[in-house]
Amino acid sequence: MTPAAVDIAALDRDDPLAEFRKRFIVPDELIYLDGNSLGAAPVSVAGDLADVVAREWSQDLIASWNGAGWFALPQTLGNRLAPLIGAAEDEVVFCDNVSINLFKCLHAALNLRPDRTVVVAEQGGFPTDLYIADGVLGQRAGMSLRLEGRDGHTLEDLIDEDVAVVLINHVDYKSAVRRDMADLTKLAHDKGALVIWDLCHSAGVMPIELNGCSSDFAVGCSYKYLNGGPGAPAFIHVAKRHHDVLRQPLTGWWSHAEPFAFSPDYERSPGIKAMLTGTQPILSMRAIVAALDALEGVDLNAVRAKSEALTDLFIALVEERCGGHGLELVTPRDAAIRGSHVSWRHEHGYAISQALVARGVVGDFRAPDIMRFGLAPLYLRYADIADAVDHLREILETGTWRDPAYAQRSLVT
Ligand SMILES: Cc1ncc(COP(=O)(O)O)c(C=O)c1O
């Protein structure tokens, strides 16, 4: 069926996930296509946090560390997330941010392969992953980084018996290319290497089978499709088979076997708690409770099916209605190897995305020339996609994006 013939209203009417939109605050005046940067606020989060402040903090004070479960939040939240990423009980903790968690995981993984000298990563991966890899390798003599896109064409070309760890973004933050977790994990394992998956752009928006793929380590943030809020703590997964030998260098007291013994000597906690470091931002942690509540009962296969349908529709409508204006699709056309965002390259992408924002269509821009639109299936309607494309068409046809005001760069894009 051509996009013009698609019955958008019927798609929304028959959407099995339509009810989930009520669990989020989506401002009426916005078409929010940036849930892959900052997810929408769950409806329950404001009341929940107000109660945390008014009761747990203001009234109960220090008793809340035990009474309200604050101290155990990294594990209790991790156990709630685990089934959504194909992990087992006691394999996941929430803590810190992705960068710090990656630092810990990289060291831990390298400690498991002491005789090997190479880390493989993607040149196009999210920059913090590369910066952290660089920092970690700088602390370990004789190590080097091999990058897909710089030192070889594909990851397959780069993984050999010297490789200790392969760090892979499950979904690329710019192009939305989705990697095959099972195949690449097996490829690394066949050469004796370990894998670390960065799940930032896939957690919460598609089924993930970390244990089904025999993954070793994974990190991810909770502020995108998990809707945990700005700066929400990230998570770490480590497969149980590595827990007995889990050594990471940020050995703070939250990773101690007996933190309240206050011993001067460090003794590593058994299990996944060994990946913790110090005190966590409890208010932000508590917001993740509401975020996970909003996902309660969700079928990630249905989320994935809608994500594919939304991204398919968006691509088809843009190509039908906005042709001839220099937009180049960066995202794979094949839904099977695509995440839940769609990116278009355009020489004037920044100004066009600003002109869209001025009309209430919020996507984002990734330098130097990529307009990125995150399609979060739990709170977006098919009609939103069609309306967004109409705004884009009008902006391109009328040339309103040429207004010099839209060329002014702001710090966060
Ligand atoms: C793929 C990926 N990894 C890592 C990060 C950054 O993580 P953090 O700021 O939590 O360290 C992002 C942020 O958008 C990301 O998209």
Image (cartoon, rainbow, N blue to C red):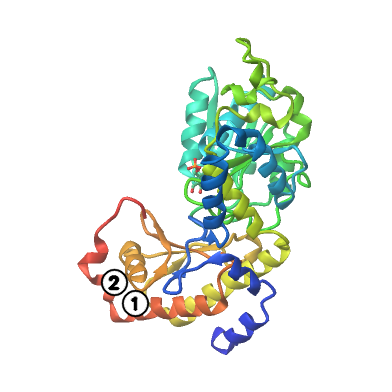
Q: Amino acid at mark 2?
A: Trp
Where in the figure is residue 239, as x and y percent of width and height?
74, 36
- Corner quadrant of residue 98: top right
Q: Is mark 2 within 8 Å of ligand 1?
A: no
Compute the Cα span from label 1 to label 2. Answer: 7 Å
Q: In this view of the protein, can residue 202 be seen by the observer? A: no
- Residue lying at the far top in this picture: please name it: 264
Callout 1 amino acid: Leu
The kind of secondary structure element at disc 2 is: helix
Residue 254 falls left or right of residue 50? right
Q: Do tag 1 and tag 2 residues touch (Cβ < 8 Å)?
A: yes
The disc placed on residue 401 is 2
The C terminus lies in quadrant: bottom left
Mark positioned earlier in the residue sequence (1 or 2): 1
Assign a secondary structure to mark 1: helix
Q: Nearer the viewer, residue 316 or 101?
A: 101
Q: Which residue is mark 1?
A: 396
Percent of width and height locating residue 194 = 69, 33
Foreground of the two, 54 or 413: 54
Quadrant the N terminus occupies = bottom right
| Camera-side residue of 132 and 238 | 238
Q: Residue at x 49, y 62 (%)?
A: 330
**Residue 411 image point, x, y percent:** 31, 50
